[in-house]
Amino acid sequence: MQKITSFTIDHTRLNEGLYVSRTDSFGNETVTTLDIRMKKPNTNDVLSTTSAHTIEHLGATYLRNDAAWKDRTVYFGPMGCRTGFYAIFHGALRSADVLDVIKGLFAFILDYEGEVPGASPVECGNYRDLCLDEAKKDAAAYAEILNRIDEGRLNYPA
């Protein structure tokens, strides 16, 4: 079996950042997968399930309601390793192309008040596993990274 692309990245050299994970073409259509890396891999500092789940609900809601990105958003969800999220967008993109919308997403989380969207047994399969306070704490840390991001954290290490 061939090794998948994400397993060819040296995670020991990977820092928090915003990276293009892959670009895939399907006929004339292209989608770009973004690695929203909130935590440095293999440091035992991972997102709690309640934080990741809450960021997933808020992030997906934000992207699918953003005027410029709602029709380009294919997917937003957590990485299994709980060090960040994947966002899949229609089009061939660079990390810098999505930086502003990802900054907006995390600002939205930081400013959000009220019940988390989809926090009911009808709308979510594990609606009790949400915590806005934890999500805000993790979002604040990542927003700081985004605010001082440079080319080294916009491209996978060579």
Image (tube, rainbow, N blue to C red):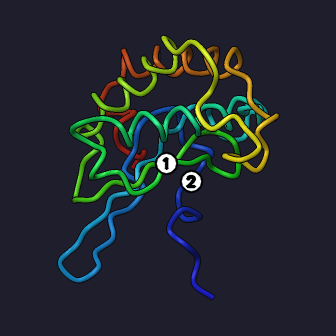
Q: Where is residue 83 in the image (x, y as percent from the top left)?
A: 64, 39
In the rendered image, the quadrant that contains the N terminus is: bottom right
49 sits left or right of 139 in the view: right
Q: Nearer the viewer, residue 109 or 46?
A: 109
Toward which corner of the image does residue 150 lie, by quadrant? top left
Tell me the distance, in whole angstroms, between the alpha carbons under discs 2 and 1. Answer: 23 Å
| Residue extending furthest toward the left | 28
Q: Name the residue under label 1.
A: 76
Marks counted in the figure total: 2
Task: Find residue 144 and report its horizontal and vertical position in percent.
Answer: 46, 14
Type of amino acid under label 1: Phe
Pick the residue in front: 61 or 79.
61
Residue at the spot 39% in from the left edge and 49% down from the top edge: 158
Residue 54, compared with residue 123, is above or below; it is: above
Q: Quadrant of residue 7?
A: bottom right
Give the residue displayed 41% in from the left and 46% down from the top.
156
Position of residue 122 measured from the top left corner of the image (x, y, whole percent): 71, 47
- Does the residue at mark 2 contact the one at mark 1 (Cβ under 8 Å)? no
* Mark 2 residue type: Asp
Q: How crowded is mark 2: few (under 14 residues within 10 Å), some or many (20 or more)?
A: few
Frontmost residue, 16 versus 62: 62
Crowdedness near tag 1: few (<14), some (14–19) or many (≥20) residues, C-alpha within 10 Å: many
User: Which residue was labeled with disc 2?
Assistant: 10
**Element assignment for label 1:** strand
- Residue drawn at the location 46% of the way across and 23% of the way down: 106
For residue 80, above or below residue 103 = below
Q: Residue furthest front?
A: 122
Label 2: state its secondary structure: loop
Q: Is residue 6 left or right of residue 47?
A: left
First along the sequence among labels 2 and 1:
2
Q: In front here: 9 or 58?
A: 58
